[in-house]
Amino acid sequence: MRTALAATTAAAVVAGATLLPAPALAWGRNVLPGVAWNHLGWLWAWANIKPVAQARESLQYRLQQVDQTRLRFTVTNTGKTPVPLVFRGHTHEVVIRDGKGKEVWRLTRETAATTAIRQQQLKPGASLSYDVKLPELKPGRYTVEAYLLNVNAGRTSGRATLTLEIPEPKPAAQLATSVAVVAPEPGGAPMLAVTVRNQGKQAVELEAKDGVLGEVVLSGGGRTRFWTGTIALPDRKAEKVRWAAGESRTWFVPLPKLNQGTTYTAEVILRDLGKQPVARKAFVAGTAPAGLRYTLTVSGKDGRQVRLQVTNPGNKPVDLTFPSGQQFDLVLWQADGKEAWRWAKDKASAAVVQTRRLQPGASLTFDAELPRNLDLSRVGLTLAAYVKAKEVGEDPVAAVAVREPQAAALAFEFEAQASAEGGRLNLTVRNTGKEPVTLRFPSGAQHDFVLKDEKGQEVWRWSKGRAFIQPVQDLRLNAGASLRYTAELPADLPAGTYTAEAWFLAEGYDGKPVARERVTVAPRKVSLRFTLAVDRTTNPTRAKLTVANPGKEPVTIRFPSSRQYDFVLRDEKGKEVWRWSQGRVFAQSVMDARLNTGATLTYEADLPQNLAAGTYTLEAWFLAEGYNGEPVAREQVTFGGRATLQDLRFRVEPVYEGKRLTAFRVWVTNTARAPLDLEFPTMQHLELRLRDSRGRVVWTWSDGEVILVAP
């Protein structure tokens, strides 16, 4: 009876859910308590199975390895409707199985969780992300499976899988790293030699992301970590560096310009071994092992003649102890740090201890030749020299970049223009050969320009104060192609003659300038105003030159000597007949004068009185730098001949007694160089008239004291 009733009720509820309104369902619930309600719940679940399944299918699962210690499990709703999630305790599960499929670790067994039920809606486009810390696993291959513990989904929840590789532990303890400061080729920058040696019996492999194995960090001179250089591989796509058992690799990192006598510390960091330095070296810039100076050069038309010179620059003898007959060695290192050639290989030497005393100023010279079968066209070859004396140690003492001579293939064109307002330097590097040329630059600096004065002292360097990237740069220059470098000279260069040097900083060319040009900087003309006046009221006649600064800024004027000006008289044919400075003595020291805005300089000179009658040209010369090439002003002056009334100059001088005007004194001057006869028809010599502001005569005076001044 109960079973039939249940079936009947179920049918009624289904019919009610399909046809009847909500009150009928409520009535059925009240009439059939305990039966209709249970079946109604079953019906609701059945009706929602399809939409829940569709929503669950819109979930996307992803499992990835974040680093060596973490996994990340991400669930994203890619659908258009929210997805209901119900969790009881744990929200997700992660299972790790070994290569045989055996479970070795499960997340829910390692972590605790409550049994409370939690509900969550995952909106469209939203994601859930869980980070999982990996347990300690033995080296090998594993399969990782991750899924949600969603009660709604049950066992049909989507899953994500990942294959996990646990590599053999890196025997970092087998690697021994050392760093040494080596002398460069003459004129070059010092370098750090970083040697990494595998002392173990197994191969060692380190990661080198983007071809960079590590860095060299420099501290000192009151600055902490002020410079960083990279230990880079020639192939920037390389990801790993492998050392065979017993193998050594050496890289050479160019250093910046250092202050001589200052103590610095170099630290080597290999990225795959962490951020802590694996080697540290303190050194004093400008010093070398055993207090000696080491010079390594590669010369010859084919670039294969090698000379190592060891010099004692001190004032005391230096004893060098050699454990065997081998006193030096040469090693050619590739750009990837591998050894390409060693001079002492297959050479026998006597096992006899030798001692050599190097007197002050004396040198030891070792000559060698690179084999003909060595390919020197490879980029990044560095030749290092070693002195096998106990007092020197095992580190290299000098290094130089080696390459096939390409001087004939590269042509350098240098243009230098300079003036007081600045100038421009242009360097063109052209590949004149028939084959492409690969150029290697130790840093981002590819060129430099230097300006030196007549004493050879450096007064300006283009690269000073500029920052450049430190990784090695390779550049391929095709046949016939060219590189062009330009620089603007400063606008405040003092006048003078300079030597401009162009430096090309590719390996093999950075030891000396590739071109030089002499340039002359003319003195800068400042904006001054000159006024020349001739005062004929004086006896003798006086010339006056006024120099004014009409600008808005003060100007500094430089005079090569104490003679700052000059006056010259020329006759009608242009011949010089008089010079003010002739016969005078002047100090030859340079003099500077500052002329403020609106200020003036005044120079005066008396003209000669013994000139023949005629018209002359008076020239005024201003002898500051930039103006001593030509006169700054000219004026026509007439001497001698017949005087006329136009040569008379009148000056009226009032005479006061206290504040009361009592008289006038009149001066009449003959400015000509010839006498002037004056005839007066009456006894009256002069008449004075006083006019008011409207020009009306208010007073006339016919008597007065007249003083005639003869020339």
Image: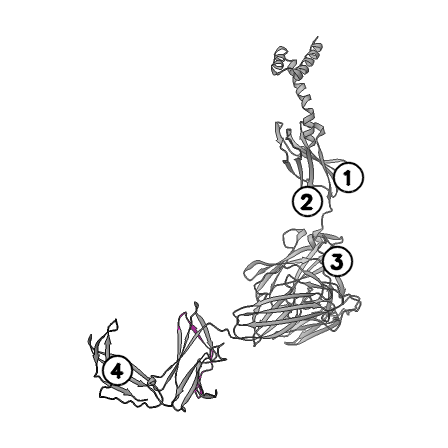
* Amino acid at the residue labelled 3: Glu
User: Which quarter of the rendering shows the N terminus?
Assistant: top right
Crowding at mark 3 (Cα within 10 Å: few <14, some 14-19, many 20+): some
Residue displayed at 29% across by 84% down: 668
Q: Nearer the viewer, mark 4 or mark 1?
A: 4
Q: How far apart are marks 3 and 1 (CA)?
A: 34 Å
Q: Which of marks 3 and 2 is in front?
A: 2
Q: What stretch is highlighted in magenta?
A: 580-599
The front one of 358 and 221 is 221
The front one of 29 and 380 is 29
Q: Nearer the viewer, mark 2 or mark 4?
A: 4
Is residue 391 visible in the rendered structure shown here?
no
Tell me: residue 192, above or below residue 2.
Answer: below
Q: Which mark is residue 247?
A: 3
The answer to which of marks 2 and 4 sits earlier in the sequence is 2
Q: Which mark is residue 68?
A: 2
Q: What residue would you read off at disc 4?
A: 666
Q: How far apart are marks 3 and 4 (CA)?
A: 112 Å
Q: Does 654 sit left or right of 542 as displayed? A: left
